[in-house]
Image: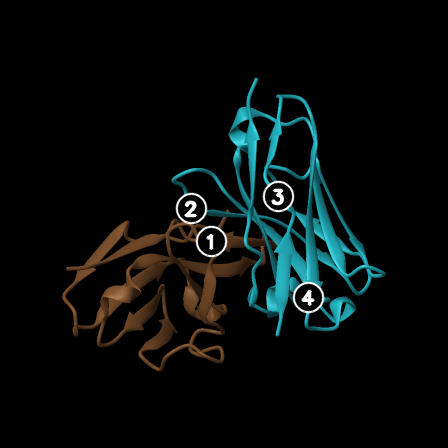
Amino acid sequence: SYVLTQPPSVSVAPGQTARITCGGNNIGSVSVHWYQQKPGQAPVLVVFGNTDRPSGIPKRFSGSNSGNTATLSISRVEAGDEADFYCQVWDTTSDHGLFGGGTKLTVL
Amino acid sequence: QVHLVQSGAEVRKPGASVKVSCKASGYRFNSYGITWVRQAPGQGLEWMGWISAHNGKTKSGQKVQDRVTMTTDTSTNTAYMELRSLRSDDSAVYFCARGNPLQPAMSPFDFWGQGTMVIVSS
């Protein structure tokens, strides 16, 4: 079955750019969505269709997807960006939804 | 504005069943689907299944497909997820989220309920 691989943690200083990766076999050929989840809260969609942002999501959040890696980038990181981030795709082989294992973003 | 409001926390014994509700407002319910996702304590997100509020079609994840029933009531704009034969590893927060009405692969989960904690313990 298809597997999405995320680093368990990413740390970045305030004002810098955080990059969170999501690896999968030929993931560049599918649509990747990203969710932010703060402690005790429901996930929030921050990027969909590889590169699009829902209404209300700051332009600091952006996505890319090519080859075997999709990337969520957060520019000018703020303390309030600390959260767990999950990538998600639709696994066409199993015809199921699939999440990556999640990445904890720490703002130093 | 779109809102999904879920039912309250539940405690069940192993072997019992639980039914979680998800009441939608702020959009045309039968023009979308509902996805169910769960999160065990300290763990990541697990996709459980999807139901179309348009035609009732469902898809279920392998871990729960033999034990889960998803339904919708378009008269009350409410989706339900029932999980049977509960085990201790079913203890988790269960979320509903809005999705595509016909092709779940085509859309993200754009609005989420607040989550329902289910504890399975003897």
Question: Disc 3 and disc 4: Cα gap in Å?
Answer: 29 Å
Q: Read off the residue under disc 3.
A: B8
Residue in the picture at 34% in, 75% down? A61
Badge 1 and badge 2 both on one subunit: no
Q: Alpha carbon of mark 2 to alpha carbon of mark 3: how far? A: 21 Å
Which chain letter goes with mark 3?
B
Q: Which residue is mark 4?
A: B103
Instruction: Select label 2 or label 3 by which is in front.
Output: 3
Q: Quadrant of residue A77?
A: bottom left
According to the colouring, which chain is brown?
A: A
Q: Which residue is mark 2?
A: B44
Q: Which mark is residue A99?
A: 1
Judge depth for marks 1 and 2 and give the one in front.
2
Mark found first going from the N terminus, 2 or 3: 3
Color used for chain B?
Answer: cyan
> How far apart are the alpha carbons under marks 4 and 2?
24 Å
SS for callout 3 = loop
> For the residue labelled by badge 2, is the local secondary structure a helix, a strand or a loop?
loop
